[in-house]
Image: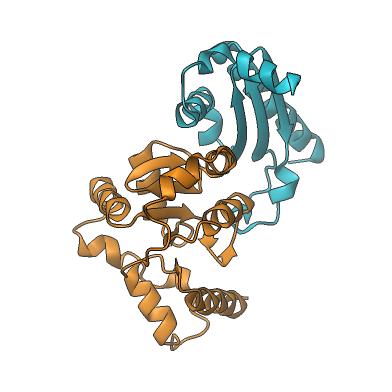
Chain colours: A cyan, B orange
Amino acid sequence: MGSRGVANMILSRASRMKAKLQSSLEASLLEIEDVSHQHAGHAAMKGNTAGETHFNVKIVSPKFDGLNLVKRHRLVYDALSEELQSGLHALSIVAKTPQEEGAAAKK
Amino acid sequence: MARLLSNTILKGISRASQSPRIVPASFNHVKLRFSTTIPNDPDSHADFQPNNKAVNESGSCSGINIKELVDKDVKEHPIVIYMKGYPDLPQCGFSALAVRVLKQYNVPITARNILEYPDLRTGVKAYSNWPTFPQIFIKGEFIGGSDIIMNMHQTGELKEKLQDIAGKEESE
C-alpha cells in the first residue's frame, strides 16, 4: 500500500468515528484527535502498520445524563464497535453532559 | 532478539518481585517459574512456551471456562488489573497510567499480563464486555479503564472505594 492509501485510511477512520458518534449520541461537542503516533512503538502495536489505532475523544452528549462513566464509555464503544473490530485499538474518552461541560467552562 | 526480549521480561519480573505490594505474575505458576528458575533454553521466549496451564487446569480452553476463571480471579483478589505488560514494566501508556494511579493507595494489586495470554485477553473482554485494556476490577466489580480510574482518583471516589483495602497485604 502506498503512502496515499495510508493517508486515506487515516482520514476515513477519524471521519467514520465522527459520523457514528454524532448520529448515535447526538453530540453537541465532538473532538477526535489521532494520537496513534504516540503509541507506534509500543509492544502491542508490533507489526501493526495501519496507523490510526489510538484516538483521544471528547464528547458532550445529553445521552450521558444520569449515567456513570462506565456506562458512558460503553455507549461510545458500542457506537464504535465496528471500528474496534477492524483495528481501532484504544480510546481515551472524555464523556460529559452539556450541563457538566457548561459548569467546567465557567470555572 | 528473542534472548534480549526474554531477558528483559525476566528483569521486569525480578524487579517486580522486590516490590512487596505487587503480585507480578500472570498466574501463580508463572511467578514460580520465573522467580525461582531460569529457563533451560534462554532463546525460548515465554510466548513460545506452553502457556495455557492455568486454563487447562480448570478444564478446557473454551470461552466459558476462561470466563469462569476471570470471575474467580476478580472475586478472590481485592484489586485485579488486566494490563499490557507488568506493573513495573508496562507495555502500554494506558496500562502504565492505571498502575501508577493504583500504586498511590498502598493497596495489594494483582496484575495479569494479557499480552502473554491471548485466551485470557479474549476471556476478560467477554467477561466485562469491554473492548480495551487495561481493565480494573475492585472487589469483583468492574471499574473500567485508565480514563475512569484516573477520573475516580481525581474526584476522590477511588479513595473511598479502596478505604477498607488499603494497608492489607495480598494473601498470595
Residue B47 left/right relative to B98: left
Count of number-bearing discs: 0
Q: Quadrant of the C terminus of chain A?
A: top right
Instruction: Work out whether residue A97 can be spotted.
Output: yes
Q: Is residue B59 above or below residue B29?
A: above
Q: Position of residue B32 (x, y in %)?
A: 36, 79
Instruction: Work out whether residue A87 can be spotted.
Output: no
Instruction: Give whichever of B132, A14 is nearer the camera.
Output: B132
Q: Is residue A88 above or below residue B163?
A: above
Q: Quadrant of residue A21?
A: top right
Q: Position of residue B81 (x, y in %)?
A: 44, 54
Instruction: Give whichever of B32, B106 is nearer the camera.
Output: B106
Residue A38 left/right relative to B4: right
Q: Residue at (18%, 58%) from the top-left corner?
A: B59
Q: Is residue A90 above or below residue A33?
A: below
Q: Is residue B67 above or below residue B30?
A: above
Residue found at the very far left of the displayed protein: B59
Residue A62 left/right relative to A51: left
Q: Quadrant of residue B146?
A: top right
Q: Residue at (38%, 73%) from the top-left corner?
A: B30
Q: Position of residue A55 (x, y in %)?
A: 67, 36
Q: Residue at (32%, 64%) from the top-left corner?
A: B52
Instruction: Give whichever of A106, B65 is nearer the camera.
Output: A106
